Image (cartoon, rainbow, N blue to C red):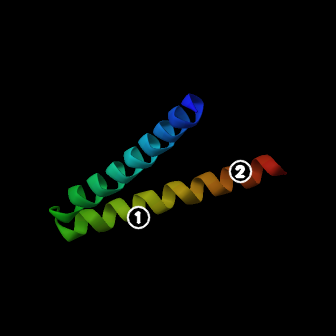
Amino acid sequence: MLIVLVALAVVSSLAAEMAYGYFADRYEMSWVRPELAEHAAIVRAQGRLREKRASNLNAR
């Protein structure tokens, strides 16, 4: 029973950490000028594209 409680605590802690990070990022971008928020979104998208391209090159 103790193992189940510890596992539940770890899972809930990870979920809370992910939720905190998500809402902290949204709050951080909400007060910034719209141009900067758009720039951050573009940079994130480019990073994802680079990761996909690198993984595709590694798969060959």
Task: Tell me: residue 35, above or below residue 60.
Answer: below
Q: Quadrant of the N terminus?
A: top right
Instruction: Tell me what residue is drawn at x 35 percent, y 49 percent.
Output: 21
Residue situated in front as seen by the camera: 44 or 19: 19
Which secondary structure lies at badge 1? helix
How many numbered callouts? 2
Q: Is residue 37 left or right of residue 4?
A: left
Q: Is residue 1 left or right of residue 18?
A: right
Query: The disc labelled 2 sits on which kind of residue?
Result: Ser
Which of the labelled discs sits on residue 42, or is there none?
Answer: 1
Q: Residue furthest front?
A: 1
The answer to whether mark 2 and mark 1 are in CB contact below 8 A is: no
Instruction: Tell me what residue is drawn at x 76 percent, y 51 percent.
Output: 57
> At which x and y percent is residue 56?
74, 55
Instruction: Tell me what residue is drawn at x 16 percent, y 66 percent.
Output: 33
Which of the labelled discs sits on residue 59, or is there none?
Answer: none
Question: Mark 2 and mark 1: span between their CA atoms?
Answer: 20 Å
Query: The disc labelled 1 sits on which kind of residue?
Result: Ile
Task: Tell me: residue 40, above or below residue 2.
Answer: below
- Which corner quadrant of the image does residue 30 belong to? bottom left
Disc with the residue nearer the chain's start (2 vs 1): 1
Crowdedness near tag 2: few (<14), some (14–19) or many (≥20) residues, C-alpha within 10 Å: few
- Which corner quadrant of the image does residue 29 belong to? bottom left
Which of the labelled discs sits on residue 55, or is there none?
Answer: 2
Q: Is residue 11 left or right of residue 41?
A: right
> At which x and y percent is residue 4?
58, 36
Instruction: Tell me what residue is drawn at x 30 percent, y 55 percent.
Output: 25
Which secondary structure lies at badge 2? helix
Task: Tell me: residue 30, above or below residue 51.
Answer: below
